[in-house]
Image: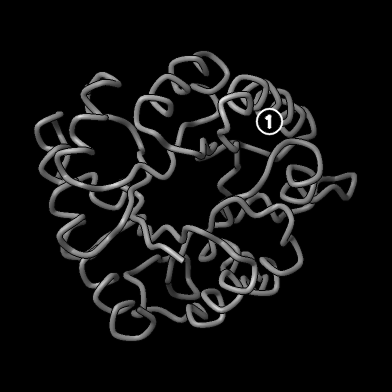
Amino acid sequence: MKIGLQLFTVRDHIRTGEDMAEVLKKVKAMGYEGVEFAGYAGLKPEEVRKALDEAGIEAVSSHTGIDELESSAEEALAYALASGAKFMVCSYASTDTKEKLLRVERVMKNVRSLAEPHGITVGYHNHSHEFKPLSDGTVPIEYIAGHACKLEPDTYWVYYAGTDPADFLREHADRIALVHLKDGSTDGKPCAVGEGSNDVAGILKAAEELGTEWVIVENDNPVPDGLSDAKRSIDWLKTHFM
């Protein structure tokens, strides 16, 4: 099982394409084997490929919002193909009405029709709102798993929603594309891995049982900054699990 980093964690260090290239090198030096992009800092697809090669790090996936996936899926695919990423993930979508949920289904099916012929798996990254049932009883995350695409469970937001993350992974074993390894408190505040109350050990055990190739570390609110937070996470994982 390989450990990657969601680059949203280190967004405060990335303002330009040059910044991106340097951050990739620093992330690799920490011990991460891959990255998941959350934007490209103005780099063109071929420039992203060059930066990855120079850093000696792998592109695992990309995060793109539902609006962008609806309006410019071909552009998102071009970046995935250039970078060598094998996953494309919807980073966020509103799902509080059936209409919005059906939009997610429609958009993700379209992205799949474009990406899957290239061997790219399409997934959905949850927050906690997808676990709140709609007025008709539909649970958005279950609908997405059954109708739209595979899942990239964000294990902190699963936990915050009141569901055991390890159990969720096992119950959706055939729908898991990637796993977001995220720690945090009970009051909605993510933190570095090993510094919160989420069951990181249980999550990693379940992910290993499922044969998950990549676990992606992320922190929405790194303290005091993204790089130092990311380093604390990978150092903790090296000490306890690697």
Report the side of 184 relative to 126 (left or right).
left
Q: Where is residue 183? Give x, y as percent.
A: 42, 71
Specify few, some or many for label 1: CA neighbours under 10 Å numbering under 14, 14-19, or 20 or more.
many
Q: Where is residue 178? Give x, y as percent.
A: 54, 53
Closest to the observer, 66 or 201: 201
Q: Amino acid at mark 1?
A: Val
Q: Residue most toward the bottom?
A: 240
Count all numbered tags in the image, as a single digit.
1
Residue occupying image coordinates x 41% and y 62%: 2
Report the side of 69 relative to 113 (left or right).
left
Report the side of 138 relative to 75 (left or right).
right
Q: Which residue is mark 1?
A: 104
Residue occupying image coordinates x 65% and y 27%: 112
Q: Quarter of the image holding residue 90?
A: top right
Q: Secondary structure at mark 1?
A: helix
Report the side of 183 relative to 144 (left or right).
left
Please tell me whether residue 208 is drawn above or below residue 136 in the rendered image. Answer: below
Q: Where is residue 68? Give x, y as percent.
A: 49, 21
- Can you say which quadrant of the picture contains the C terminus? bottom left
Q: Quarter of the image holding residue 59?
A: top left
